[in-house]
Amino acid sequence: MASYDKVIPPGGEGKITLKVHTKGYQGKIYKSAKVNTNDPKQNVIRLGIKAFVNVPIFISPGHVYLQAEEGRKASRTIEIRAGLDRPLTLQPERFNLKEKVTYKIHEIEKGRRFRILFSGIPGPPGNYSGFLQLRTNYPEKTVVTIQIRGSSVKKRETSNQ
């Protein structure tokens, strides 16, 4: 969101204020704004803001997409990392894709880093979507929800030429 002085006298100065709403972001971010001017030497200026959004729990990537040919299995891994200076625990709470996807939680660094391996269960062509909810011990973020989407596509016909 931007606000700025609408009129600046010739040779004068103006003020531009940029605000970045960080809800839904985590880690390093970069946002920019384009400023149009009537300066013949520099009619467009780009302003940039770099920031690090600290969150209680980092999830990378923030969602899972699985795609495989019919009858084959696709797998993806996400990492969850504690963003606070105290141990993190994760407990499965809700999972609504039991017929389509399996998952395994591996603790990589005790109370700090976890990897979750998601694997699609081979099946007929089609799309699916759902989630895995994990209960945490952090009052700042009691539940982590990982969105999962996937598809099984028809096998491609091969021709012998």
Image (cartoon, grey):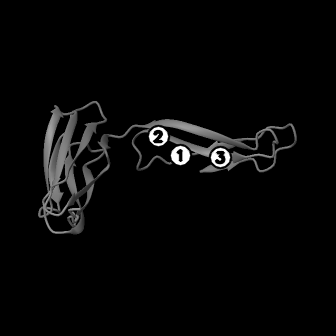
The amino acid marked with disc number 1 is Val
Give whichever of 149, 21 is nearer the camera.
Answer: 149
Q: Quadrant of residue 100?
A: bottom left
Q: Which residue is mark 1?
A: 20
Residue 11's x, y, as percent?
A: 86, 37
Give residue 105's mark: none
Q: Are marks 3 and 1 in contact (CB under 8 Å)?
A: no
Q: How much space separates mark 3 and mark 1, taking CA atoms?
A: 14 Å
Residue 34's tag is: 3
Residue 119 placement, left or right of 148 = left
Quadrant housing residue 85: top left
Q: Earlier in the sequence, mark 3 or mark 1?
A: 1
Say which quarter of the image contains residue 66: bottom left
SS class, disc 2 = strand
Disc 1 is placed on an element classified as loop
Q: Which residue is mark 2?
A: 29
Residue 143 on image: x %, y %: 25, 51
**What is the spatial separation of the Cα atoms under label 2 and label 1, in whole angstroms?**
10 Å
Mark 3 and mark 2 in contact (Cβ < 8 Å)? no
Q: Residue at x 21, y 54 (%)?
A: 133
Q: For mark 2, does the 10 Å Cα neighbourhood hold few (<14), some (14 to 19), or many (20 or more) residues?
A: few
Alpha carbon of mark 2 to alpha carbon of mark 3: how far?
17 Å
User: Sequence-wise, which precedes: disc 2 or disc 1?
Assistant: 1
Looking at numbered disc 2 in the image, what kind of residue is underneath it? Ile
Marks 2 and 1 close (CB-CB < 8 Å): yes
158 displayed left or right of 8: left
For image coordinates 54% across by 43% down, the residue present is 31
Image position of 84 with respect to 60: above or below: above
